[in-house]
Amino acid sequence: MIIARTAAEMDAVPRGSRRAVVMTMGALHEGHLALVRRAQELADQVVVTVFVNPLQFDEPEDFERYPRDLDADCALLEPLGVDVVFAPSESEMYPGGEPTVSVSAGVVGRVLEGAARPGHFDGVVTVVAKLLHLTEPDVAVFGAKDAQQVIAVRALVRDLNFPVEIATAATVRDDDGLARSSRNVFLSQAERERSLVLSRTLFEAQTWADAGASVDEVVAQGRAALEYADGVDVDYFAALDPADATEATGDYRGEVVIAVAARVGRTRLIDNVTTRIGPPDAAEGETP
Ligand code: PAF
């Protein structure tokens, strides 16, 4: 496994016939490894980037506290057969400190998670743009768990004409349904049990949609189910248009991301499922 620490070292890595990138901030867990496996299905050369991006943190203390252990990350990646780890320093990525020119996530960056974390998605799309330039992949794989991040990255690639395919890997869940997250370690046993109401409500939302409920009904039923959940302080439960993260309401038809964010104790959790409102378009069922 090659470890490249500078843009020049990354540039010198010989290309496979199809290169995939998985972008991470390190502190790797099973969710990241699932992204790597997905990348290996899609390409013959996999690059994993490890960079804790200061631009996407709202609180400087969170950035300072963020766990950094490249050796531990590499020890997880090497047995999987990852080809390259690109782990640039902060001064390599941002030699003059905060960049003069950066990318805006537009409306995607201002709603839901973006409203809770102002500037976060601008920081994400800026670093993703840089990492795409530096690693030059054919395909980049992101976790479906961060649904709004996926929407922001797809918008970046579409609106700024990046020649890369964006793929997603399904959310990895524990047997009880809890979505894997590096934040789960902060949950006490009681909080962990309480937090299961989030995934349970999302799965129920899928069944309501399958049974023909409108998007407003799905959202209203989901909010009602969460309203009295003990010890769970819901920030939002919403249906999003996967094209631009605007809220899907009224007579919306088609694919939606049902997303939830809630604080359980001191831990903020997010989760989502993708479902469909209304019957599939006739054209979707046709065989060519
Ligand atoms: O999902 C993450 O870990 C980060 O937001 C990403 C995509 C690596 C950008 O820093």
Image (cartoon, rainbow, N blue to C red):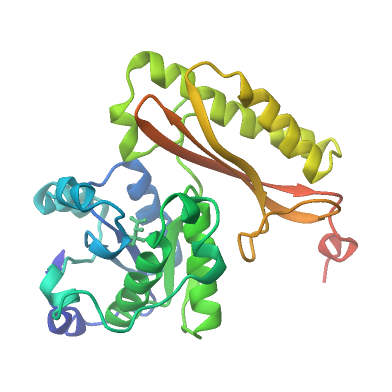
Image location of residue 130, percent across then percent down: 31, 78
Would you place residue 128 above or below residue 232 in this image? below
User: Who's the residue at 78% across and 45% down the image?
Assistant: 215
Q: Tell me: 186 left or right of 79.
A: right
11 or 120: nearer the viewer: 120
Along the line of sight, which residue is nearer the eye, 25 or 46? 25
Q: Is residue 5 visible?
A: no
Measured as percent of width and height from the top left, residue 255 is found at 72, 55
Asked if 159 appears above or below 218 in the picture, the reply is below
Q: Quadrant of ligand 1?
A: bottom left
**Which quadrant of the figure contains the N terminus?**
bottom left
The answer to which of 60 and 186 lies nearer the viewer is 60
- Residue that extends furthest to the right in the rendered view of this protein: 282
Q: Residue at x 87, y 50 (%)?
A: 279
How many numbered markers are drawn? 0
Residue 73 in the image, given as x and y percentages of width and height:
18, 50
Write down the quadrant of residue 155 in the picture. bottom right
Name the quarter where the C terminus is drawn: bottom right
Q: Is residue 181 among the parts visible in the rendering? A: yes
* Residue at (38, 24) in percent of width and height: 265
Question: In front here: 23 or 228?
Answer: 228
Instruction: Classify 191 as above or below 105.
Output: above
- Residue 91 lies, in percent from the top left, at 11, 74
Q: Is residue 149 left or right of residue 238?
A: left
**In the image: residue 46, left or right of residue 274:** left
Q: Look at 16% across and 75% down and name the residue there.
A: 97
Q: Is residue 75 left or right of residue 248?
A: left
Among the 4 quarters of the image, the one containing residue 191: top left
